Amino acid sequence: MPLTCEDRDDRALLDEARRQMTVCVVCKYCNGYCPVFRAADARPALTDADLLYLANLCHDCRGCWYACQYRPPHAFAVALPAALARVRALSWRRMAGIPWPGGAGGGALLALACTLLVPVVTLAWVPWEVLFAPHPGPGAFHAVIPRGPMVWGAALALLPPLAWVGVAMARFWRVIGGGSPRQVLRALPRALGDMLALRHLDGGGVGCNDLDDRFSPWRRRMHHLILYGFLLTVAATVSAAIAHHLLGMRAPYPWFSAPVLLGTVGGVSLLAGVAGMAGLRARADPAPQALETRADGALLLALLAAASASGLALLLLRGTAAMGMLLALHLGTVLALFVTLPLGRLMHAPFRALAILRAAIERRTPQHREES
Amino acid sequence: MTADGPPEVLVAGGGLAALCAAIVARRAGASVWLLDQAPEALRGGNTRHARNMRVAHDGPSPLVADAYPEAEFRTDLRRVGGDTLDEALAARLVADSVDLPAWLAAQGVAFQPRAGGMLPYSRRTVFLLGGGTAMVNALVRTAARLGVVVRHGVTVADVDPGGGVTITRDGATRRIATGAVVVATGGFQANRGWLRETFGPAADGFVNRGTPHADGRLLRALLDQGAMPVGDAARGHLVAVDARSPADDGGIVTRAEGMTDGLVLDRDGRPLVDPAAERGSPRYANWGRLVAEAPGQIAHVILDAAGLARLGPRVYPPVRTLDTLALAACLGLDAGRLAGTLACHGPGGGPPWFTLSLRPGLTFTGLGVRVDDRARVLDGRGRPWPGVFAAGMIMAPALLGGRYLSGTALTVSAVFGRRAGEEAARHALDL
């Protein structure tokens, strides 16, 4: 089991989170902010597995930090958002079986290597008179990078990280108690609603503490732009595959086609969301944050920005001689995003989805039913 | 401080009463300073540790269940306040409690709806989302936005009957004249010297559950200058807290539990019994008093495994001892006598034993200044001091007599804070 392997730093981190969360379970003042406190109430023993679950259920809204009568300089030094952020990072690493300690340095290097790999290989392999020539009309992309290498390269590069994430998710699901297919099915509508609405970024109705002790809806809004932008770009890719295989159309697609419209709206939304989120992060009060986990988040924002910006540039300049290298660069950024997936902050998405699903299951079972 | 001082209304204190007074006085058009002795990290007085507020209401709402008629609130106050109860203040408190949730919400304070299912049933009190610290954050924001000059780490050292004020900050002292002063600095539960005067050497065994800045300096200053006292210093509200609690600011989580599930022994191994005990939840104030009167102001709860299971999670876990001999060594008691006491009175399921040590924890003190229902401080003959007002726990003994009625401290603070702010602004602006 992933949690039996003892690492002294991880142990200290989990023990510290347990100590702090115990204060919360006794105090209860914050239990209106989010379901973390309800879930903690239902598992007062706060085992390591419980803490991994609670940490991923936490959306980092920071309401409990600003409301806390026990935050530093109090002797109890409760700083729950930071403690849970550390446990979150630990959970992704442990469930993915990554042996080295956290930190964004390795991920950043790998991402950079992936981003540059495709352009370098393209420069080396594609004849420059092809690469740097304008290619108007359908089939232009594959005139530069042939379809075979593109599809097989993508499959080979993307499937292992996705499978890796899948294994990590399965382990996490088992560790946090999982659920039968029947339970999952019954809890799914509520869980999906909570995920897609980012319901728990609402601080119990008042909003998040984005910058300081004021409540605001902006972090949730920026996250919406990023999440839905990301989903739209995925939809663009799927619709492009459908257009290619079922409709026999060849990329690049016209402006008013599903792949281009979805990709454009998605890319612009992603870029706007990333910019907004980066702005909030830059101005946010550092006090409630686990500062060593910030680089992770910055790297994810950078990768998302690179992928969407290069995609939009490719769209705008696809009729020009710059198309070939922009295509290679865009593919490189997408490769970087996926290859670093099991190492980085993007792991919060599948893990949080599972934690929300588990919470929805618990709300349906009698021992956790609401009292009123 | 801003260059345009001194203000028309000066508010001393940093908790709910002070914040309400400052906001209301500012909204009435006065220039206002709010001076809080605590540093910013500890702002908010004991409001930081509060959670719910008692309000009269006629029917269920998203915030509070069923009904709590004004007459019932007054009856509860009479029961608790006893012969100290000031009927005029009680009537004011109850009537003005009705619109408090709406008024506080308009100042940015968030309440926790019942619908989330995370609140205990309550028809008497509304709950703050996130507790008192979140309310303090919201009110400080609102006060600052309205133009109240809010300063922390500034002590109002003295207020004289004419409204003159002495301020100290970083060791420097200055006197200023203001239009009106609102004193909302609470009791003296953090003042060790005064506690010793009141409770004798026993005070050294007390834990202060709240802010270390409740030194009662202005309470004493007002009384020394002839303000009419109300209540009784020795009638503070005490509960039993874990002996490992920090000296100040332990708040809600250090309150001891388990007294009714196990055997409570004093320092010398004699059982302590709450004569008014009922099964189930302990009467916290009785236990505070019992421990305060016990030798050495310490007592020990001894639980068996069943008692431990009922105890629930604790910030300070009980100390486990494998047998009675080890328990006796741990408590410094004679093993033979302890075994006899346990056999006679103790929980039947041990060893192992699980032990929590208790101290008396002081929530607030029971001596205050008497005010009229316009929150004006009265002199020894019942005449108001012009321009000097008091709100919050410094005048609450006229209502509670130093006793506890859940959620009422916040109600007193908000109702009389608003009242004092309104009257202070009127007084200052009419000058």
Image (tube, coloured by chain):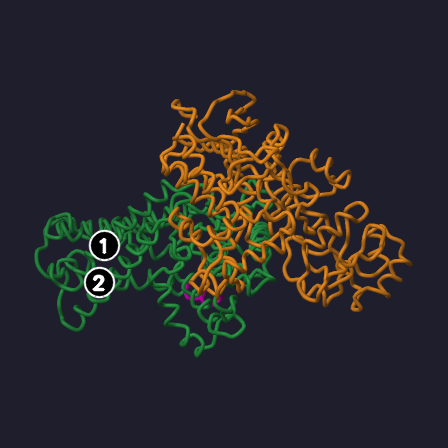
Chain colours: A green, B orange
The answer to whether residue A355 is seen in the rendering is: no
Farthest residue in the right direction? B336
| Location of residue A192 in the rendering, given as x and y in whole percent from the top left corner | 36, 68
Residue at the image point whose x is 13% and y is 65% from the top: A250
Q: Is residue B123 left or right of residue A250?
A: right
Q: Nearer the viewer, residue B101 or A326?
A: B101
Which contiguous range is marked in magenta?
Answer: A164-171
Q: Nearer the viewer, residue A30 or B428?
A: B428
Which chain hosts label 1?
A: A
Instruction: Name the residue that disc number 1 marks.
Output: A267
Q: Taking B217 as reference, is A112 above or below it?
A: below
Amino acid type, callout 1: Gly
Q: Taking A50 as reference, is B357 above or below it?
A: above
Which chain hosts label 2?
A: A
Q: Nearer the viewer, residue B257 or B378?
A: B378
- Kindly report the distance in space between the C-alpha atoms of the residues bearing marks 1 and 2: 10 Å
Instruction: Name the residue that disc number 2 marks.
Output: A236
Q: Earlier in the sequence, mark 1 or mark 2?
A: 2
